Image (cartoon, helix red, strand yellow):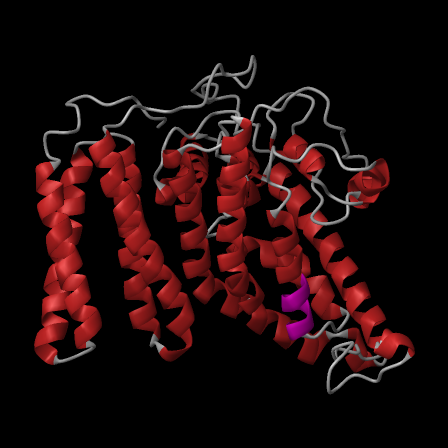
Amino acid sequence: MAIIQASIPLFFVLIALALWVAHRRGDRVHRLNDSIADLSCGILSQLLGLFIKLGTVAVHAWVVAHLSLQRAGLLPEWIDRLPWGATAVPGVLGIDWVALGSWALAFVLVDVAYYAMHRYSHTVHLLWAGHVVHHSSEEYNLTVALRQSALHGLLSWVFYVPLALVGMPWPMFAACYALNLVYQFWIHTREVGKLPRWLEWWLNTPSHHRVHHGVNPEYLDRNYAGVFILWDRLFGTFVEERAPPVYGITTPLRSWNPVWANVHVFAAIARDARRTRRWRDKLRVVFGHPSWRPADLAPPSGPPAWPARDAPWDPPLPRAVAAYGVVQFTLLLVVAYRTLEVAATLAWHEEAALVFLVALGLACVGALHEGRRAALVLEGARLVAVAVAAAALLVAGIAPMLAGAALAASLLSLAWLLRLRTALPVTRPPVAA
């Protein structure tokens, strides 16, 4: 998935450009707490992907090697050479048209598989538990595009097994899948209206995808496309944008904690499956529609899906605490990006330790932005643990420059945190259970 990682700097440039455009227009489509929560979810998704994507690629490669239709002589081998470059067989205009056709077919098949995966991720509760992260923001902007699940890959790989059965080489699949996701980044915006009709008819556009993120009754479970909106038109799931969408999920998350954003529906499924009495209902809680609940359990708590909420959840926060959160998030972002860069050189337990520390730090930032006083204690404990670990590395002579920087940053952050201990109110705005 090097394509996605290589695109990260471009994503941030486009986010900055979108912020500038929104500022010039006077549009308030970004909030600091929400955007940091979005990016925190994206960081966790990329870091956990270091482990999950390896399993996905291994399964795909194994199926191609042992179960593909090519092994039975039922299909020809895929042409996976690049359409240009040293391995190409150039034709008209210097393009290897046979290879280009093979890649185009692969891209279309990946998009069909994405449509199927995405559609079932909205209609099967267990799959929705993994996908809900992406919908839980009540804003709609480019940072929401990066608000991805850290756990959905544990389940979604099943929908791509047919591509392995038809023998699609895993590098070709991985490249097309990554390009599919990169395309979807730009459609998460309110700054682009409707495009020319001929583009709106066959491509997924910002207008079509705004519908998908809306909780308006007429928009729920619609417009699942990745790149080509044709699939929604063909399979009866297309709706055109008319009324302004209200964004989020029907029971708002009301939390900036990226870890809780990833697990809250899994927790609800486990709770309902344990409490309901009949085994048939236990299975339906897991595999039924997300809106279904057993008759022997109370209706879901929280506000109704409609009428629309007056305003997104936005608890007040002292500027000093918000500034601390921004600085800590920036440091954690640097650590996460560096981890992604050097992951191939790390042992698995080193990767796991770094992922845990980043996840804990992001959870602390989210809790601070919620105004939780208990977060001060947890954040202090995190900083002390980082300082102790960095000091131990210094004593052992391991990565002295990095260890020294980590020690200095943690001690300075701890001193700053102590100055904030009276900044948070004794009470805090309620969050959803």
Residue at the front extreme?
24
Q: Residue at x 82, y 76 (%)?
A: 99
Q: Is residue 65 visible?
A: yes
Please say whether residue 174 is one of the residues in the magenta stretch. yes
Q: Is residue 20 magenta?
A: no
Residue 325 spot, x, y in % from top left = 27, 42
Residue 171 image offset from top left, x and y in percent: 64, 74
Q: Main secondary structure of the magenta part?
A: helix
Q: Return the x and y of residue 318 as percentages of the image width and height.
A: 23, 28
User: Residue at 26% across / 27% down in the picture?
Assistant: 317
- The residue at 44%/42% (across/down) is 38
Residue at the outermost right position: 92
| Image height of 135 relative to 12, above or below | above
Question: Is residue 286 something one can see in this rendering?
Answer: no
Rendered-image quadrant of the C terminus: top left
- Above or below residue 77? Residue 105 is above
Quadrant in the picture for the N terminus: bottom right
As displayed, is residue 154 above or below residue 214? Answer: below
Q: From what the image shows, is residue 132 above or below residue 114?
A: above
Numbered range of the magenta stretch: 171-176
Q: Is residue 71 left or right of residue 321?
A: right
Q: Position of residue 62 (x, y in %)?
A: 62, 76
